[in-house]
Image: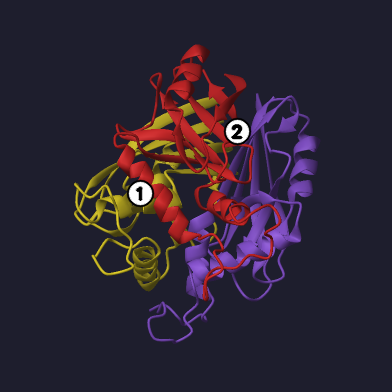
Chain colours: A purple, B red, C yellow
Amino acid sequence: MRQATDRLSIQTRGKGLTEFTRAVWAWVDQQGMETGLLTLWCAHTSASLAVTENASPEVLVDIADAFERLVPEDRGQAGAQRYIHSLEGPDDMPSHIRTLLTGPQLTIPLAEGRLALGTWQGIFLFEHRTRPHRREVALHLIGE
Amino acid sequence: MRQATDRLSIQTRGKGLTEFTRAVWAWVDQQGMETGLLTLWCAHTSASLAVTENASPEVLVDIADAFERLVPEDRGQAGAQRYIHSLEGPDDMPSHIRTLLTGPQLTIPLAEGRLALGTWQGIFLFEHRTRPHRREVALHLIGE
Amino acid sequence: MRQATDRLSIQTRGKGLTEFTRAVWAWVDQQGMETGLLTLWCAHTSASLAVTENASPEVLVDIADAFERLVPEDRGQAGAQRYIHSLEGPDDMPSHIRTLLTGPQLTIPLAEGRLALGTWQGIFLFEHRTRPHRREVALHLIGE
């Protein structure tokens, strides 16, 4: 039994989902394990990890729109969500809350040399800030 | 230290929560480990895993209703959520978003031969599509 | 390769986030591992785990407010969320749903003797009941 660790750096284009499934596969393949457990950790409080359909780009637009509705920015309307913490801009506080909803971490079994991802499952970095950011994802694999 | 992997197949009855805690316990017991780490992975983009109260069926109805409100289907009303991706039916896009909110994975410590589940915690498959589906959950246990 | 397990007990003050990052660090340090995988499991159905910014207390207030909006209590208004399961008080059913949204578990890589937490990431117990509770979090570390 052994472990491997590494770090991926992912450039986002502002709000939305960036797929990086292939980079994860490539790294796992390099470790040459048959059976194991892969963990991804997103080291940020305004970006998160998500697993969703990787077939249609429309799905990604609808997801981003749904999160705008679920946790709206403060646009100053009557009855709208207001945030106390607004120093870092109107997209900052919603980005922390949206990050909580999908979470910083994924742990995926590896069996017979393959990750347990289903046919339509892709791994995405979900950027919640308006401006592009470089995001760090820690990788950990244990197995043999 | 060793690993075990397997796959559970869970038949759902359409939208709602199906408990499968006992099947998980049975499989873990068969592996004969005292200390370890169990991971469950749901290999789908329109069904997810959830841990919630397993005592009252009313709780499960209220949870399903809450998800209908949180991520509504497009019913064509003014001001309602609209989805671009609607080819696969009005329940498809909300099912992807609801899947993101509870997630595809659970990792549960095993200590003294017992999973760390609390008294009221059960493990559920959360089906988000209207029609029944057969869902695959990958299991991975590492420990000794 | 070896494992360590333990249990933290966290006293909450009712609804809101209680940070316990330092207690986690202290326990991990005691295990003396360089590389590994840490899992935290919250053994409750009305309290959850969350990773968010640990710099400003305002952020924590805004997060708690956002969850009040996302999953409102039944206040009896027309059009408001109603719950069938209300025997245990108006805060009970929303607490189960809010627990689902952030989840019972975190798994964090350890590399070069350090957890993969980013600069601004803290580990929090998210209490969803109105009254204070003592909450149990199981810890599991595997590595060497």
Residue B56 screen position, x and y as percent: 29, 37
User: Does the image show residue C122?
Assistant: no
Label 2 Cα crowd, 10 Å radius (few <14 / some 14-19 / many 20+): some
Secondary element at image label 2: strand
Residue C74 screen position, x and y as percent: 27, 61
Q: Residue furthest front?
A: B76
Q: Chain of mark 2?
A: B
Q: Quadrant of residue C76?
A: bottom left
What residue is shown at x 55% (from left), y 28% (from top)? B10
Q: Quadrant of residue B90?
A: bottom right
Residue A79 screen position, x and y as percent: 38, 81
Three-letter residue code for mark 2: Arg
Which residue in the structure is indicated by mark 2?
A: B135
User: Does the image show residue B38?
Assistant: yes
Quarter of the image with the N terminus of chain B is top right
What residue is shown at x 51% (from left), y 38% (from top)? B106
Please tell me whether residue C86 is drawn above or below residue A65 in the rendered image: above
Which residue in the structure is indicated by mark 1?
A: B62
Q: Earlier in the sequence, mark 1 or mark 2?
A: 1
